[in-house]
Amino acid sequence: MTRMFMAYLILFILAAVPMTEAYIVIPVGIFGGLNPLAALTVGVTGNVLTVLLLIVFMDRFRNWMENRRKKRDGPGKRNERAGRLFRKYGVPGLALLGPLIVGSHLTAFLAVSLGGTRRAAFLWVTASIIIWSVLTAVLVYFGVDFMGAGDKKTFLRKYLEGA
């Protein structure tokens, strides 16, 4: 396996892990010297794929979350905030703001648990992942270029090229 493939595989895995959102790991990849468009594509794909799996296996995940909540004695502040967002703005509002508060995976779970359809939750959360990921990727890309860091070898580029 090449080093470049490994870098993108790690980016995919990190984006797929709950609470390690695509909009967080994509800038790390870009700062590290990965191609911005490829990093964006791989990161979004990893994040969206696990959100889809979560929605498909919703019942099992719901049981796991309920057992976890019972051990903690209540829903927690973050879940309460997400519930308020849902009551005020519905699935679209929760999906667009939720990933910043509780993460995209928990947002999808809450959107369905609080009364949204699986289809609406998936579409809105996917749109949210794409919007936040593109926004952070563009800001990082132009920020790096604006600072002139694009001319220097980055830490990841040195590793990938064998330093």
Image (cartoon, grey):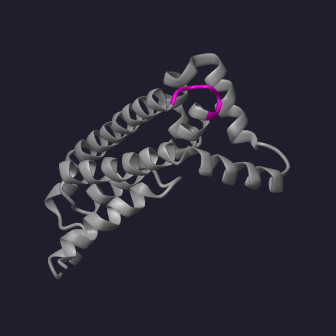
Q: Where is residue 54 in the image (x, y as percent from the top left)?
A: 50, 48
115 inside magenta stretch: yes
Give the residue displayed 33% in from the left and 47% down from the top.
44
Residue 74 left/right relative to 133: right
Q: Position of residue 124 (x, y in %)?
A: 43, 29
Front-lying residue, 55 or 26? 55
Write down the quadrant of residue 98 in the picture.
top right
Give the residue displayed 53% in from the left and 53% down from the top.
19
* Residue at the far right in the pictured view: 73
Position of the C terminus, as image quadrant, is bottom left
Front-lying residue, 140 or 95? 95
Front-lying residue, 133 or 71? 71
Task: Magenta stretch: give its range.
Answer: 113-117
Residue 97 left/right relative to 128: right
Looking at the image, can residue 32 be seen? yes
Magenta span dominant secondary structure: loop
94 inside magenta stretch: no
